[in-house]
Image (spheres, helix red, strand yellow):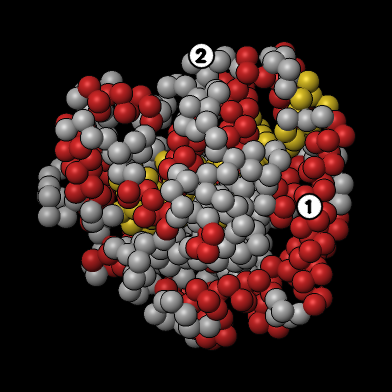
């Protein structure tokens, strides 16, 4: 079943494109017009620029939303990133326009179209985690982060495809595939993989199908797709963004986070997702941070400008100390790109020293067994809130009896291993998680202290591999693990390309140093100037493979 047919049937019961469904009852019979807006380049425009135009009456949210809907209709059939568009998107845009006319804008995201990864609960659209098991009735309530976005006036544009169950099902998963949405393609080269699990969110941004997207990460699922699709992705400090209403893997590591085409928009989205009003921390967040921790100064933090780097030109790097973790295992091409990146940062006045964070082998040994126990606990709790399978054991049986669930993720070995894993009350599990937390935090803290660093940098990803369901993903990417396991923030910004295929630079900082990391990332982004639009090539015809 194609992504378009699935999206149409879930939304209306009949096949239709997402954009047509969103405009149903308005002007869905009208012929598609150009997605272009006078004076607005969707590839490069920033949220502050859009807000300035809306404040002057030179742009409406409705026009912007229609432009993105028409672009989804035109471009998404190439990449299969958007599962469905929201039937209320245009009404939300019209309400934003009324507020702007009255001078009552709700803030930087008012009227801005946002896509949500389809493991984030929405009361008015299905939330499936890519699985047919959840493809029935929508959840009863929005996720807390969706409530925040709505309260800020954001236009919820729709839901994006993902690696099914956030890549926590099969021993040999294929990133970007789900039974609900099929395979998401990398917009730069269509037979290449988009990484996962926030595959649709990143690919949609690369294709300029929304201004902002929300991803989720347990280990690498925001930053790897961001790097591989040439966009920006921020994994916030654990607990900074509420995880309530998001399909879980592990409360000890899970976080939702913002993705965009530039650091400016990413930071503004984070300022809304964690606005410090008391909703984001505490009981609902499944984390220990307080709302707004690490965000002092947002949205006006140093380095945030109407156009990324407009008043910076990378000079914010002067005197910054950055530790470069080269990871030569990602290949000679990526290593050469890191060499040229370090040269550019040094030319801007940064001090770049080579580092190797310790304890990585032990972290790799312990993380997966801990996640198995946590997944069993947390997915059972989530499934109890939804119609369909109510436990992991019932979910395993569902997959056994639905052949569509076996067309690419042939197995569900991780589900089965989670059923057999010790409970999180087991002393051995508790000792394992305590060691993981200690070693992951020390890995970053000790490295930064030893070299007096502002951040640690590493390649986010290798060049995208060719998508192959029979083989599955063929790379282990270690750079995301220290920040993911420790709960510290990380940020991927475009670093350049190997041939046509983007590679990101992953920046990591200390606990709750999100604002400082975004500020540094804005300066790095401006210095590297590595973003470029995709060309939707069918294949590279060889080369840059792994």
Q: Is residue 514 above or below residue 321?
A: below
Q: Is residue 122 above or below residue 271?
A: below
The crowd level at tag 1 (other Cα within 10 Å; few <14, some 14-19, many 20+) is: many
Residue 14 position in % (x across, y down) = 23, 67
Q: Compared with residue 508, is residue 297 higher up or lower down, i.e. above or below?
A: above
| Residue hosting label 2 | 311
Position in image of residue 530 (x %, y %): 58, 25
Number of the label disc, if any, that sits on residue 440: 1
Instruction: Say what secondary structure mark 1 lies in.
Output: helix
Q: Residue at x 59, y 28 (%)?
A: 519
Residue 303 % position (x, y): 55, 23
Q: Which residue is more in the foreground, 388 or 277?
A: 277
Q: Position of residue 387 (x, y in %)?
A: 39, 80
Q: Residue at x 77, y 73 (%)?
A: 429
Q: Is residue 15 visible?
A: yes
Q: Considering the numbered disc 2 on the image, is that residue within a helix, a strand or a loop? A: loop
- Residue 74 appears anywhere in the view: no
User: Horizontally, is 165 left or right of 510 in the view?
Assistant: left
């Amino acid at each position: 079943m194609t992504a378009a047919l699935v999206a149409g049937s879930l939304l209306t019961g009949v096949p239709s494109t997402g954009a047509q469904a969103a405009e149903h009852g308005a002007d869905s019979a009208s012929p598609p017009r150009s997605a272009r807006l006078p004076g607005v380049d969707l590839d490069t425009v920033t949220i502050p620029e859009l807000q300035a135009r809306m404040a002057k009456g030179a742009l409406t949210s409705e026009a912007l939303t229609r432009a993105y809907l028409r672009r989804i209709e035109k471009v998404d059939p190439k990449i299969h990133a958007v599962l469905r568009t929201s039937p209320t998107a245009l009404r939300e845009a019209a309400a934003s326009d009324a507020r702007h006319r009255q001078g009552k804008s709700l803030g930087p995201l008012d009227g801005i179209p946002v896509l949500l990864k389809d493991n984030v609960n929405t009361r008015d659209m299905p939330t499936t985690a890519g699985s047919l098991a959840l493809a029935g009735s929508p959840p009863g309530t929005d996720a807390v982060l969706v409530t925040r976005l709505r309260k800020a006036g954001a236009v919820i544009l729709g839901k994006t495809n993902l690696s099914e169950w956030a890549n926590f099902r099969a021993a040999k998963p294929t990133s970007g595939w789900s039974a609900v949405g099929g395979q998401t393609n990398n917009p730069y080269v269509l037979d290449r993989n988009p990484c996962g699990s926030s595959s649709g969110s990143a690919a949609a941004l690369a294709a300029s199908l929304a201004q902002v997207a929300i991803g989720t990460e347990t280990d690498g699922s925001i930053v790897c797709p961001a790097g591989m699709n040439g966009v920006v992705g921020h994994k916030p400090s654990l607990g900074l963004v509420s995880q309530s209403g998001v399909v879980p893997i592990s409360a000890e590591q899970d976080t939702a986070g913002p993705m965009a085409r530039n650091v400016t928009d990413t930071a503004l989205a984070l300022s809304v997702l964690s606005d410090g009003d008391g909703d984001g921390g505490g009981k609902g967040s499944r984390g220990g941070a307080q709302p707004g921790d690490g965000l002092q100064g947002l949205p006006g933090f140093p380095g945030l400008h109407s156009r990324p780097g407009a008043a910076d030109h990378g000079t914010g790097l002067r005197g910054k100390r950055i530790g470069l973790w080269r990871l030569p295992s990602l290949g000679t091409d990526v290593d050469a790109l890191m060499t040229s990146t370090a040269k550019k940062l040094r030319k801007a006045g940064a001090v770049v020293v080579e580092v190797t964070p310790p304890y990585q082998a032990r972290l790799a040994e312990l993380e997966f067994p801990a996640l198995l126990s946590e997944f069993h606990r947390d997915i059972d709790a989530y499934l109890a809130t939804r119609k369909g399978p109510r436990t992991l054991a019932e979910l395993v049986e569902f997959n056994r009896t639905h052949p569509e669930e076996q067309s690419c993720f042939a197995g569900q070995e991780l589900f089965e291993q989670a059923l057999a894993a010790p409970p999180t009350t087991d002393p051995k599990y508790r000792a394992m998680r305590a060691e993981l937390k200690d070693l992951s935090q020390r890995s970053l803290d000790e490295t930064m202290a030893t070299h007096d660093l502002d951040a640690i940098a590493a390649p986010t990803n290798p060049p995208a591999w060719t998508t192959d369901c029979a083989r599955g993903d063929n790379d282990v990417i270690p750079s995301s693990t220290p920040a993911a396991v420790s709960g510290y923030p990380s940020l991927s910004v475009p670093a350049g390309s190997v041939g046509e295929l983007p590679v990101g630079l992953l920046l990591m900082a200390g606990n709750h140093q999100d604002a400082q990391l975004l500020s540094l990332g804005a300066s790095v982004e401006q210095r590297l100037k590595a973003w470029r639009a995709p060309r939707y090539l069918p294949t590279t015809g060889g080369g840059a493979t792994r």
